[in-house]
Amino acid sequence: MEKPSKKNQELLNELMTLTIEELVAVIKSGEANPSVLNVARQLLKDNQVTAVIEEGSPMQSLVDALPFNENDDE
């Protein structure tokens, strides 16, 4: 695969920055609908962003609320 030109790379970086800023703004406003949350989830997944879950953290609360556990079959 051909490496993007410097100008294209700058445009891609700007697009990613604008997308992330918009997602953060909508989510923080409390007005994010399921499709917006799915876009944010997919962006994180596509960029291999992971989180360490610490006891008592908001992430742990989310995991606890989900209707499955790690022993469930996929």
Image (tube, rainbow, N blue to C red):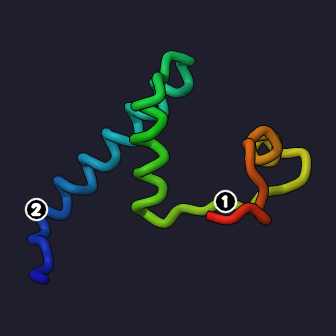
Find residue 59 and report its horizontal and vertical position in percent: 75, 46
Q: Amino acid at mark 1?
A: Ala
Q: Quadrant of residue 28?
A: top right
Q: Amino acid at mark 2?
A: Lys
Find residue 34 and report its horizontal and vertical position in percent: 47, 28
Asked if residue 9 is positioned above or below residue 40 in the image, the reply reads below
Q: Which residue is mark 1?
A: 51
Helix, strand or loop at label 1? It is: loop
Whether residue 55 sits left or right of residue 1 in the image: it is right
Find residue 19 and report its horizontal and vertical position in percent: 33, 40
Disc 1, disc 2: CB below 8 Å? no
Q: Quadrant of the C terminus?
A: bottom right
Q: Name the residue at the right extreme.
A: 56
Helix, strand or loop at label 2? It is: helix
Q: Which residue is mark 2?
A: 7
Image point (78%, 56%), residue name: 69
Other residues around mark 2 within 10 Å, as few (<14) / some (14–19) / many (≥20): few
Q: Quadrant of the N terminus?
A: bottom left
- Point out the tag, 1 or 2, that comes first from the N-terminus: 2
Image point (10%, 81%), residue name: 2
Whether residue 6 sits left or right of residue 48 in the image: it is left
Of labels 1 and 2, the one closer to you: 1
